[in-house]
Image (cartoon, grey):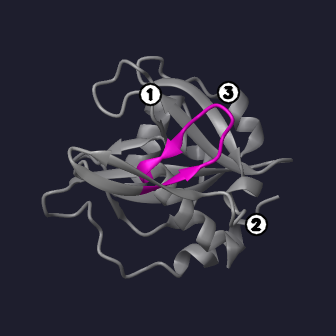
Amino acid sequence: MLDGTALRARLDAVGGEADPSEGGTLIPSAVLVAMVNGAEPGVLLTKRNDQLSHHAGQVCFPGGRIDAADASPEAAALREAEEEVGLIAADVEVLGRLAPYATGTGFGIVPVVGVVAERVLAGLRPQPTEVDELFVLPLSVVTDPGAPRRERMQRRGEWREFWVWPHARHFIWGATAAILVQLAERLRR
């Protein structure tokens, strides 16, 4: 079982870092890093619809752009989670934030960490135009220091290095993998 008080203390250690969602040229964004509290704790992930114009078929956290009407990154992450997978804000205990992450595609992401009860998963209904699948990456994998690995790929003539997390059916990489690495570091403290 997850201890929200202990997790909150680990997240509070972040503070004071620049928020790439505020100002600048990055597109302000927020994601919900929903930790599932149950018999087998884990992290809720989605596989994006293969027909989307951006990041089609990729594994990610529920989330998206921060709208002008959103009061905070937390509000944006919760709104997006409800729109994408039907997770209502009242079912999420928001614990805090991880350090912001800037993507190579121009998004400034604020990872908002929250806890949801495992029983809530049964009621989630992914928006089919956005999400093909929901799944939970076990916390035992997230906290295993040997699980993530670095890979390299050449794109547009330049070599890029990125994190990849093991999964039997999905390729978890990019911003999602980098945010999971950060979460794992906090959880191992």
Q: What SS does tag 3 mark? A: helix
* Position above or below: 116 against 188: above
Which residue is labeled 2 in the image? 3
* Position above or below: 97 against 65: below
Which residue is labeled 3 in the image? 123
* Residue at point 70%, 63% (across, down): 143
Please, what is the three-letter code of the amino acid marked with disc 3?
Gly
Please, what is the three-letter code of the amino acid marked with disc 2?
Asp
Q: What SS does tag 2 mark? A: loop
* Residue at point 65%, 34% (across, down): 135
Please, what is the three-letter code of the amino acid marked with disc 1?
Gly
Count neighbours of disc 2 (C-alpha within 10 A) and say few if under 14, some if 14 to 19, many if 20 or more: few
Question: Which of pointers 3 and 1 lies earlier in the amino acid sequence?
Answer: 1
- Image quarter of residue 103: bottom left
Image spot of residue 127 (x, y percent):
48, 22
* Position above or below: 179 against 59: below
Distance between the Cα atoms at labels 1 and 2? 33 Å
Q: Which of 163/74 is in front?
A: 163
Which residue is labeled 1 in the image? 57
* Residue at point 13%, 58% (across, down): 25
